[in-house]
């Protein structure tokens, strides 16, 4: 019988038996057999009559189900409980530890989004069909649009933050930099689950917790891992106690012993995972790391034990910064982290962040700080786009300038072409047929250029016109300190027997650690504080104006800048007030916008405008650059240089100090002394004192002397070098000791570039030399792969 015949017979037999089992009153066997045969011919009944061929996965599932069933029956016979076992608990803990990168709780996300919505901030983006890879450590969002109070801050731009890069976010005051950080901190855009974000946005709460405990308490992951390790160790100890106790009910049971052994193996594997993670976090030295961070930010050992409620808002902000650095998130967001720091703390933070190997996105307007920390720059340009540049701030400026020069060349070329084509069309568009065809052809070319998009004329950064009116002349001494002493109630002397004078040509920068009395000295100068002993004698006609770190306190945030100035100066016309505010970058809609809605940088401009309107003889500036953008800082520096009155400056912005200060006064040991040297030298000496890379070459441009040296080197590089043969302009080589083979007088440098000609001396005999580490040339010790003038060859 054929296979099909056997299948037909079995199908008929099965159908007949099924009909009999149902108990039908009348059985039509012929109909049953006919129906069964037809079904068998069509392939029906295979699942019921024959064993179905299972796939590999289905066989594994079936085998696993059989094992679990057998195990359950075995446990039921031995009287074991089928409730949740310790194995289940261990497995659950294992999955929790393996997936350590936890997302922010849904409740916290909802609260953050509700807060942003209440502030009028919204965003949209393009959703990825594939979703976000939870294991990724990069942030990538396309078609991102950000709106704040109905104004479009960013329009259809891209967000791209890659692991291992340190980004500096630049843009003019009020363009939405802080708002952008708030959206990222609230995870309002798709961010992989493996990325934990810490956004430093507010100071720690004033409480009885010490500064050290406040820093260590932020590390919730470390605390959870330590608790899990304790619980697992306790479980292993309980199992060991059961084995040692012969009276235990389960003692002596071989199956029970096997289960305990298997469970202990799982616990050991789990503990290995936990301890590896704790090693990565350096949990055993957590307290030491916390103390080191606090010390770097200016906290003494005694201050670290003080309750946070005993600190001012600026010091509590430092505690919050220490928490952010201690936890070490995958993505760290910092908004002006140097605002509440003194120069020593800024240098320490600069060195600490320059070694950050995760994602760092910070807002800062200190060029030295950006040069030392950042590997990339993100520019929020006037077109409401995020433009990405590789390199630090100096490289950003260079690349941006080159880009604008090339764009201007392209723009001028296109405009020239358009002008020529329009002239040709106007001249020959109605001539003979040949000329008309050419004119029509040029018309099509012109239409195509317009259709494809013309290059826009580059617009440079808008320069502000800060200006402080000249106050006139006063005979010296304008202000004199004679044997002044000062101390706060129930405290020791802050200053002992200090004497000095200030004139209208004084340009003084006050530097020193926090708490040494810089702000106190400024208050003594303007009369806000009276000396404990001694005498302060100002000129009877002397007018002073002070910019404080808490400058917001002098503004009425319920008024617009125009209304505020109209109240202060009722005799000025509205048009004059508009023009004056416009000089300080307070223009357009900003003039009629409530100051409570302005950014901190825009508020600072209003305060500077108020100082200029007062017409002081001496300006006291206490950290004026904290919230100003780059353009405003440059304009402020120019305005101070043109100001004919005196200036007392307290700032950690070394570039501003180098531009405006003639003297550097160091506040230290209850006295004041003049520093001999520039701010760049002071910074280098401070780095040595702090033990931070004493031999490092600074990347910033705070030293005017360094600029002059750089200009001289560039000038020397352009001079032609002659050696009796071909005279060429060659680049200035890196200053290194001249090798013996090329040290003779009149012999050119032994290295030259490919594209440059060079007078090559007669080849010297080959000298066997040991290879130098790093692939350097054995004759010269240099590491470039270039043409060697000594032997006429290229070395590896």
Image (tube, grey):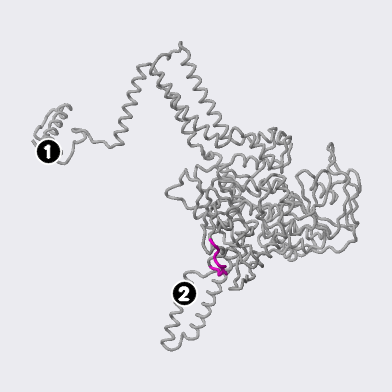
State the image quarter where residue 663 is shown.
bottom right
- Taking the image as shown, residue 5 lies to the left or right of residue 218, namely left
By secondary structure, the bulk of the magenta-drawn segment is best described as loop
- Taking the image as shown, residue 600 lies to the left or right of residue 437, namely right
Q: Residues within 10 Å of mark 1 (few under 14, many from 20)?
A: few
Q: Is residue 459 above or below residue 796?
A: below
Q: Which residues are magenta?
A: 755-765
Q: Work out how far the residue at label 2 is from the one at label 1, CA to CA, in angstroms.
A: 76 Å
Q: Position of residue 580 (x, y in %)?
A: 74, 64
Q: Residue at x 70, y 57 (%)?
A: 702
Labels 2 and 1 touching (C-beta < 8 A):
no
Say which element carries label 2. helix
Say which element carries label 1. helix
Q: Residue at x 46, y 84 (%)?
A: 429
- Taking the image as shown, residue 326 lies to the left or right of residue 624, namely left
Residue under label 1, please give it: 4
Q: Quadrant of the N terminus?
A: top left
Q: Position of residue 581 (x, y in %)?
A: 72, 62
Residue placed farthest to the front in the image? 765
Q: Residue at x 49, y 31 (%)?
A: 272
Q: Position of residue 657 (x, y in %)?
A: 74, 56
State the image quarter where residue 508 is shown.
bottom right
Q: Position of residue 778 (x, y in %)?
A: 56, 56
In this rendering, does residue 153 appear at all?
A: no
In this rendering, does residue 471 appear at all?
A: yes
Considering depth in this image, is 722 or 45 the residue closer to the camera? 722
The label on residue 14 is none
Q: Is residue 758 magenta?
A: yes
Residue under label 2, please give it: 447
Q: Is residue 60 magenta?
A: no
């Amino acid at each position: 019988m054929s296979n099909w015949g056997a299948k037909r017979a079995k199908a008929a037999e099965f159908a007949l038996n099924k009909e009999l089992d149902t108990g039908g009153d009348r059985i039509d066997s012929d109909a049953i057999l006919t129906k069964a045969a037809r079904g068998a011919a069509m392939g029906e009944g295979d699942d019921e009559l024959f064993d179905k061929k299972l796939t590999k996965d289905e066989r594994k599932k079936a085998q696993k189900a059989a094992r679990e069933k057998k195990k359950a029956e075995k446990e039921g016979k031995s009287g074991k409980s089928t409730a949740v076992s310790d194995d289940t608990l261990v497995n659950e803990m294992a999955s929790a530890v393996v997936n350590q990168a936890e997302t922010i709780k849904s409740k916290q996300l909802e609260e953050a989004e509700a807060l942003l919505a209440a502030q009028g901030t919204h965003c949209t983006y393009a959703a990825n069909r594939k979703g976000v890879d939870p294991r990724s450590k990069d942030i990538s969002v396309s078609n991102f649009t950000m709106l704040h109070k109905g104004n479009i801050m960013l329009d259809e731009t891209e967000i791209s933050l890659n692991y291992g890069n340190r980004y500096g976010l630049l843009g003019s005051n009020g363009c939405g930099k802080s708002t952008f950080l708030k959206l990222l901190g609230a995870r309002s855009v798709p961010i992989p689950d493996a990325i934990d974000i810490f956004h430093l946005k507010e100071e720690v709460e004033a409480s009885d917790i010490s500064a050290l405990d406040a820093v260590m308490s932020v590390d919730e992951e470390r605390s959870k891992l330590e608790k899990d390790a304790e619980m697992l160790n306790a479980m292993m100890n309980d199992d060991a106690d059961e084995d040692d106790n012969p009276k235990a009910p389960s003692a002596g049971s071989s199956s029970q012993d096997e289960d305990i052994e298997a469970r202990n193996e799982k616990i050991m594997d789990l503990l290995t995972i936990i301890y590896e993670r704790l090693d990565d976090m350096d949990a055993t030295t957590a307290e030491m790391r916390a103390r080191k961070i606090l010390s770097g930010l200016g906290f003494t050992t005694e201050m670290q034990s003080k309750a946070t409620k005993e600190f001012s808002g600026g010091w509590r902000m430092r505690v919050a910064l220490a928490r952010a650095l201690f936890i070490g998130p995958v993505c760290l967001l910092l908004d002006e982290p140097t605002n509440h720091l003194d120069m020593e703390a800024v240098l320490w933070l600069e060195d600490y962040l320059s070694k950050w190997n995760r994602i760092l996105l910070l807002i800062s307007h200190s060029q030295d700080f950006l040069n030392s920390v950042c590997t990339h720059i993100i520019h929020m340009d006037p077109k409401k786009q995020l433009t990405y540049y590789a390199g630090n701030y100096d490289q950003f400026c260079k690349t941006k300038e080159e880009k604008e020069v090339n764009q201007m060349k392209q723009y001028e070329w296109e405009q020239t072409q358009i002008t020529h084509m329009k002239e040709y069309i106007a001249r020959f568009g109605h001539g003979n047929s040949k000329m008309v065809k050419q004119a029509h052809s040029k018309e099509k070319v012109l239409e195509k250029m317009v259709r494809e998009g013309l290059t826009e004329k580059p617009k440079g950064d808008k320069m502000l016109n800060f200006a402080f009116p000249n106050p006139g002349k006063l005979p010296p001494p304008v202000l004199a300190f004679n044997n002044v002493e000062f101390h706060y109630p129930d405290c020791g002397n802050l200053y002992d027997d200090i004497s000095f004078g200030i004139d209208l040509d004084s340009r003084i920068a006050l530097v020193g650690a926090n708490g040494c009395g810089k702000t106190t000295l400024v208050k003594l100068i303007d009369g806000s504080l009276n000396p404990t002993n001694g005498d302060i004698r100002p000129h009877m006609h002397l007018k002073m104006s002070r910019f404080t770190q808490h400058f917001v306190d002098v503004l009425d945030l319920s008024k617009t800048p125009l209304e505020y100035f109209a109240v202060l100066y009722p005799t000025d016309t509205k048009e004059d007030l508009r023009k004056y505010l416009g000089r300080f970058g307070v223009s357009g809609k900003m003039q009629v916008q409530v100051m409570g809605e302005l950014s901190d940088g825009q508020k600072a401009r209003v305060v500077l405008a108020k100082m200029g309107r007062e017409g002081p003889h001496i300006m006291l500036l206490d950290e004026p650059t904290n919230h100003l953008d780059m353009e405003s800082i440059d304009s402020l520096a120019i305005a101070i240089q043109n100001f004919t009155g005196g200036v007392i400056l307290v700032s950690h912005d070394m570039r501003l100090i180098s531009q405006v200060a003639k003297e550097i006064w160091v506040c230290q040991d209850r006295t004041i002394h003049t520093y001999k040297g520039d701010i760049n030298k002071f910074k280098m000496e401070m780095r040595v004192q702090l033990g931070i890379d004493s031999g490092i070459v600074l990347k910033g441009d705070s030293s005017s002397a360094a600029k002059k040296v750089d200009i001289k080197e560039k000038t020397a590089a352009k001079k032609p070098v002659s050696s009796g043969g071909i005279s060429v302009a060659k680049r200035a080589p890196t200053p290194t000791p001249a090798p013996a083979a090329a040290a003779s007088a009149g012999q050119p440098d032994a290295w030259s570039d490919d594209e440059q000609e060079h007078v090559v001396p007669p080849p010297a005999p080959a000298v066997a030399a040991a290879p130098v580490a790093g692939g350097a040339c054995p004759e010269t010790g240099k590491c470039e792969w270039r043409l060697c003038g000594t032997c006429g060859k290229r070395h590896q």
